[in-house]
Amino acid sequence: MNTKVVYAKDLTPQEQIIALQELKAAIEVERNKLEPMPEFVAPPPLIAWGDTELKIIYPWFYRASIYFILGLVIGVVGCLYATSYLS
């Protein structure tokens, strides 16, 4: 049976300073490898609708928020009806 053992020892203050500097240098190298995010992304172009009209396509959450509010109102009214607060 082969057993490998790793012994760890406390670093001296000088070794801690060197290790910290090496870690900061490695982090800086990795940071420089990352591609920077663009600051501004242009919106998608408008889609032609018919011959001369343009239709604006809104983000999905506008429609989703309307459905959420509608479902909330229907749910509250349904609960009130089920508990006979509404007849």
Image (cartoon, rainbow, N blue to C red):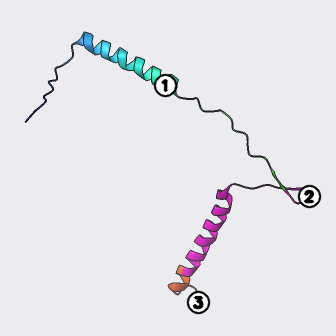
- Give residue 12's position: percent from left, percent from top: 21, 13
When the figure is inspected, residue 22 is found, relative to residue 35, above or below; the finding is above
Among the two numbered marks 3 and 1 on one chain, the one whose residue lies closer to the N terminus: 1
What element does badge 3 sit on? Answer: loop
* Residue farthest right in this picture: 52
* Residue farthest top in this picture: 14
Front residue of 7 and 83: 7
Q: What stretch is highlighted in magenta?
A: 49-78
Quadrant housing the C terminus: bottom right
Residue receiving disc 2 = 51
Residue type at the position of mark 1: Arg
Question: Mark 1 packing: few (<14 Cα in 10 Å), some, or many (20+)?
Answer: few
Q: Is residue 24 magenta?
A: no
Residue at image coords 58%, 85%:
86
When the figure is inspected, residue 87 is found, relative to residue 7, above or below; the finding is below
Q: Answer left or right for 80 relative to 39.
A: left
Residue type at the position of mark 2: Asp
